[in-house]
Amino acid sequence: MTQQGIKYQQSGDYEKAIECYKSVLEQRSDNVSALTNLGVALHHINKTEEGLSYIDKALTISRNNPDIMYNKAELLRMSDHFEKALQCYSFVLTAQQPTATHIFNMGCCKEGLGLYQQALVDYQKAFSMRHDPKFLYRQGVVLSNIGSSVDAINVFLQALDLDPNYVKVLLSLGKIFKGQNPAQANEYFNKVLTLEPNNPRAMVGIFNANMAMCNWAGYDEQRFTIKNAIEKALENNEQVPMDPFEIMSLNLGYELQVKTAVAGSLYLQTRLPRREHYDFLNRDNHNRSIRVGFISSDIRKHAMAHLISSLFTHFDRNKIQIYMYTHSRDDESAYRQTILDKCDHWVDCFQWTDKKIADEIYKDQIDILVDLNGYTASHRLMVLAFKPAPIQVTYMGYPGTTGAKFVDYLIADKIVVPGETYDYFTEKIVTLPDCYLSTDDQQAISRHKGLRHDHGLPEDKFILCSMNSAYKIDPGVFDSWINVLNACEHAVLWMYATKEETRNNIIAYASQRGLDRRKIIFASPERDKSRHLARLAHADLVLDAFVVNGITTSVDALWAKVPVITCMGSTFQQRAAASILNGIGLSELVTTSMQEYKETIIHYVNNKQAHQQLNEKIAENRKTQPLFNTNRIAKHLEKAFELMWQRYQEGLSPTAINVPKIESVTQICDIN
């Protein structure tokens, strides 16, 4: 009967296999083979804990049997109990000569624990024992995760030499190249579609690569094909083929965004190992300042760092202590050093495991943990899934819900998240009285902006400008720009697009719609932020993107005293620029339809006096309005943290909080 069970198990009929094994055990409860195989079969029908109990029973009968112990290790590994699995694998090593698969599986456990360098050693050793492309694939994944893209590419290419049709490798190469060479990325994604015509990850990859190149051929068709794939995955409780941040660029509305975010957070929770929950009840946190910990991958030369560089200067240290957990590679930038110098405590968590970071946060007795990533690149939401702080908050990095039960609050304002949209957020909304963003009122602007012709710009034209990343530009908003340029003879468009494919696609698209290609001028890359801000002054009007607003780009333009026009949509990411403009007292530059957006641009292009008055208003409002009053922003955040903490200490659940306006906050920095 045991052999019959094994045959059923090998054919994938686990239910019948389980019946056979149980029949054997009814006759003889100490049958080690039946106990072990029953445990493995139960795992395959998602009853891993029950399966492990049978394997443990087998081990009590046949003590220290390496074959049974190996099966236990396998079940533990496949259910993400990596530490326990490693202990079992290590025991087996003392009794048996290791195989390549054994070493590889140990590497998988170490990778799952975030022990990336140790995992690489195991994968390399496994490959030296047997040339399996799977071993190279996992090496490439680890190298990619630690930021070694060049090494990852080389390893992935070696894997393709062994198996040219390895779909996971092709997808991984496409993902890496998507940011640096979208055309190359599409070659890999298209190869996947020749092998698996309905592969949703390849379809998503092609869409994203096309957006990065402003290649809008089949734009709507691609969007709705992907939408159907996402909906199908959600219906079948399968992993969604896009992360929530990528979905924002599809412009499919709030409902799908929140469903995808919830699915993403549930996936994180399924990966949590069994553990004791952190206990906050026995802490002595009375009569001390609130400990607020920030966790981010972007404490480096990054848009986030540009915005928060001077924020931490302004917190009252009698009320708030600032802890920073940075998990990005040290880029030795001034931004990183400036931020860390202004924190009371900071920890470099680069290449730490999620659990180790969570343990550190708990050890530091953080009261409020603020995540600055959301679902953006290199996020560590898994750290928050461990719930290492009694109050957990998402802020700034991601313009939408995390969908996570383990995140209590989202900090916003009444424009980006009006009351009628609260149902699209799993977090309770903390509404700041002004724009929700932190900005830096001490950002330097170079004195050497040069002349217009130094940047390839005509001296006698009205300069419309877009410095947004290419993926944020959709054909609808670009059509509006073309209409404006065709209607206004003396206007030109100054755009940020560094890749040749992107520039060629933009010119081709515009030319097909009757626009003189000379009316589009491309900005060259400028890595020095102060010089970039200086050159922005040559623009007359900045045009915001619609599907995903330009957030830091809008702040940069206004800091450089250049007006921004936006079209406000329905979702957070489509309302951020409206919040920014209201924060500087320029609500007249917020439009609510593409027609109004286009007409408002044309009005200022053709009305010199109105444009001059707008410039004068910006110059004045920079000094008086809340947007660039970093001290005021910090005081409102400080009050938000106090209100969250007060509720917690009173034993109350999180709820929506409206932070009262603090009118008496002065501007500390002298803005010119």
Image (cartoon, rainbow, N blue to C red):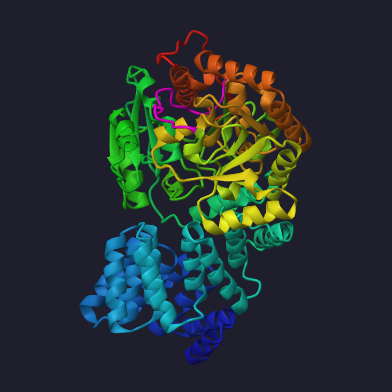
Where is residue 504, by image quadrant?
Answer: bottom right
Can residue 287 be seen here? The reply is yes
Q: Is residue 567 left or right of residue 334?
A: right
Q: Is residue 33 above or below residue 354?
A: below
Most common secondary structure along the magenta stretch? loop
- Rendered location of residue 260, percent (x, y): 62, 52
Where is residue 317, by image quadrant?
Answer: top left
Determine the residue positioned at 41% across, 77% down.
Answer: 159
| In front of the other: 411 or 449 | 449
The answer to whether residue 349 is magenta is: no
Determine the residue positioned at 61% across, 39% down.
Answer: 549
- Rendered location of residue 339, percent (x, y): 33, 32
Can residue 653 be seen here? The reply is no
| In front of the other: 305 or 420 | 305
Residue extending furthest top? 664
Where is residue 65, by image quadrant?
Answer: bottom left
Q: Is residue 395 left or right of residue 357?
A: right
- Rendered location of residue 344, percent (x, y): 29, 28
The quadrant in which the C terminus is found is top left
Determine the residue positioned at 34% across, 35% down.
Answer: 335
Q: Is residue 206 left or right of residue 633?
A: right
Q: Is residue 605 above or below residue 521?
A: above
Identify the magenta region.
433-451
Q: Is residue 263 above or below residue 128?
A: above
- Rendered location of residue 175, percent (x, y): 50, 62
| In front of the other: 649 or 389 | 389
